[in-house]
Image (spheres, grey):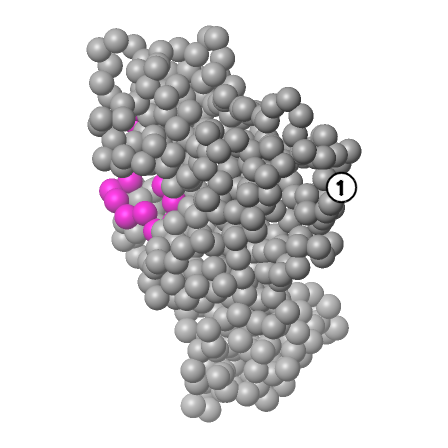
């Protein structure tokens, strides 16, 4: 024990004698011996359980935050002068025995009870309509919406900070309880009881045609956007299709002007909308009809019989159309895809072609296959992957993400930790 203590103190002397003023700081993604010394000291104090790798990874980031929290420091995960001074004092307190819930990290594809707990909270705050235990695209969109509304980093990941704000006090709901308040906002793809109330009022004023869409749904559809735009234009408001407090107050005032000769009747999606997997909207039916006319989609072959739901068969059909029309084959019907799809030069599916477009090459966090093994082995060869820290496993771990980011940075590629065609080719694969 004495030898270990002496060794630790020597490390600290080396660590803090280089810059006596301790004006430097160590942060996420830093590398070097100082990082290794920090790892060693936090391991000695019981905050860090990872390898001494000289790399400031996510595990060390959490350890620094835990140390800061216990010792009454600013909790930012950065080992700056104040944090290093307390670590140097060797008076650090022991870590909290039971991990607090705000160190959880949930992301797209996860499926567990914590995901369900987050979903219930998002549902309570008005960001999500349904709750199960799967982190799907609907939950991802709800998380990013919550993060944006609460001034958090908009990455769709429920990490330490997002978790603490989500379950803390002062959390902002999606829409205020009072529609007349300044922050009230309803827009495309929102779901709430206010949407149903909005539709019924638009029906009463003659802007919403029940023959085109039933107003009972609580989904803010594209047709609702068009109806709101018509109301706003006729009542001297900004015609953006978004219901804020001004539009709401005008709708329910005694001076609201009813519709004139006819209500809006959109026949195709506009260029500013986006349709994607699991989305429900009458515009999805129009999309399917157009794909069917071009030979890419068949209602009979789709296991999901709900015409307004963007099923996985819809995704594969859109991919096939995109692939055949020189577009990015991601299965999402965004502005470029919709413009091409409804345009006069949209290419029909070649006769005799019964296949759908293959999924674009993509390796990312939590994938597990032989290509991940090849990736890790190649990163080892290029000295970006340290097998003393983690073995080649064929599973796309968080450490693999950081190694890919480092490789991408060295090649001037987008540092997203995801291996697409460009990164795969840069690695030397075809």
Where 416 falls versus 50 (above or below)?
A: above
The residue drawn where x is 43% and y is 90% is 1
Q: Is residue 358 magenta?
A: yes
Q: Quadrant of the C terminus?
A: top left
Residue 270 shows up from this direction: yes
Where 376 falls versus 112 (above or below)?
A: above
Dot 1 falls on a residue whose secondary structure is loop
Residue 400 shows up from this direction: no
The residue drawn where x is 72% and y is 39% is 256
Q: Residues within 10 Å of mark 1 (few under 14, many from 20)?
A: few
The residue drawn where x is 63% and y is 85% is 89
Q: Nearer the viewer, residue 7 or 330?
A: 330
Question: What is the x, y in percent for residue 409?
Answer: 54, 42
Q: Residue furthest bottom?
A: 2
Question: What is the x, y in percent for residue 74?
Answer: 66, 74
Where 224 falls versus 135 (above or below)?
A: above
Q: Nearer the viewer, residue 8 or 270?
A: 270
367 vs 71, left or right, is left
What residue sits right under mark 1 in the picture?
A: 255
369 vs 332, left or right, is left
Q: How many numbered tags mark residues here? A: 1
Q: Which residues are magenta?
A: 357-371
The residue drawn where x is 48% and y is 69% is 103
Q: Is residue 209 magenta?
A: no
Q: Nearer the viewer, residue 274 or 245?
A: 245
Question: What is the x, y in percent for residue 172?
Answer: 62, 62
340 vs 16, left or right, is left
Q: Quadrant of residue 32?
A: bottom right
Question: What is the x, y in percent for residue 69?
Answer: 58, 78
Prevailing SS of the magenta stretch: loop
């Amino acid at each position: 024990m004495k030898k270990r203590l002496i060794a630790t103190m020597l490390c600290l002397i080396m660590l803090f004698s280089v810059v006596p003023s301790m004006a430097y700081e160590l942060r996420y993604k830093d590398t070097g011996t100082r990082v290794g010394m920090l790892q060693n000291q936090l391991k000695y104090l019981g905050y860090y359980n990872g390898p001494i790798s000289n790399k400031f990874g996510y595990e060390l980031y959490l350890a620094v935050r835990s140390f800061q929290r216990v010792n009454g420091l600013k909790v930012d995960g950065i080992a700056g002068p104040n944090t290093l001074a307390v670590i140097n004092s060797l008076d650090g307190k022991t870590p909290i025995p039971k991990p607090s819930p705000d160190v959880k990290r949930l992301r797209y594809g996860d499926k567990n009870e914590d995901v369900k707990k987050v979903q219930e909270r998002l549902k309570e705050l008005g960001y999500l309509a349904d709750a199960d235990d799967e982190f799907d695209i609907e939950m991802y969109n709800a998380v990013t919406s919550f993060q944006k509304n609460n001034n958090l980093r908009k990455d769709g990941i429920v990490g330490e900070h997002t978790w603490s704000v989500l379950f803390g006090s002062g959390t902002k709901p999606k829409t205020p309880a009072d529609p007349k308040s300044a922050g009230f906002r309803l827009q495309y793809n929102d779901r709430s009881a206010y949407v149903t109330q909005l539709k019924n009022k638009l029906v009463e004023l003659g802007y919403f045609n029940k023959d085109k869409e039933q107003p009972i749904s609580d989904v803010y559809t594209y047709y609702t956007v068009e109806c709101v735009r018509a109301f706003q234009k006729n009542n001297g408001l900004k015609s953006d299709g978004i219901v804020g407090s001004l539009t709401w107050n005008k709708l329910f005032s005694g001076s609201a002007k009813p519709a004139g000769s006819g209500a809006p009747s959109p026949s195709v999606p506009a260029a500013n909308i986006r349709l994607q997997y699991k989305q429900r909207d009458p515009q999805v039916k129009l999309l399917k009809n157009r794909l069917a006319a071009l030979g890419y989609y068949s209602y009979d072959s789709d296991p999901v019989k709900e015409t307004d739901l963007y099923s996985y068969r819809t995704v594969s059909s859109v991919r096939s159309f995109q692939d055949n029309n020189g577009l990015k084959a991601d299965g999402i019907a965004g502005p470029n895809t919709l413009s091409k799809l409804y345009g006069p030069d949209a290419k029909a599916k070649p006769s005799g072609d019964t296949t759908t477009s293959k999924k674009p090459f993509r390796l990312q966090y939590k994938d597990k296959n032989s290509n991940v093994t090849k990736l890790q082995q190649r990163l080892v060869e290029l000295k970006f992957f340290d097998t003393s820290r983690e073995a080649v496993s064929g599973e796309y771990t968080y450490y693999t993400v950081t190694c890919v980011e480092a490789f991408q940075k060295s090649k001037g590629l987008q540092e997203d930790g995801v291996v697409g065609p460009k990164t795969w080719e840069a690695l030397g694969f075809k």
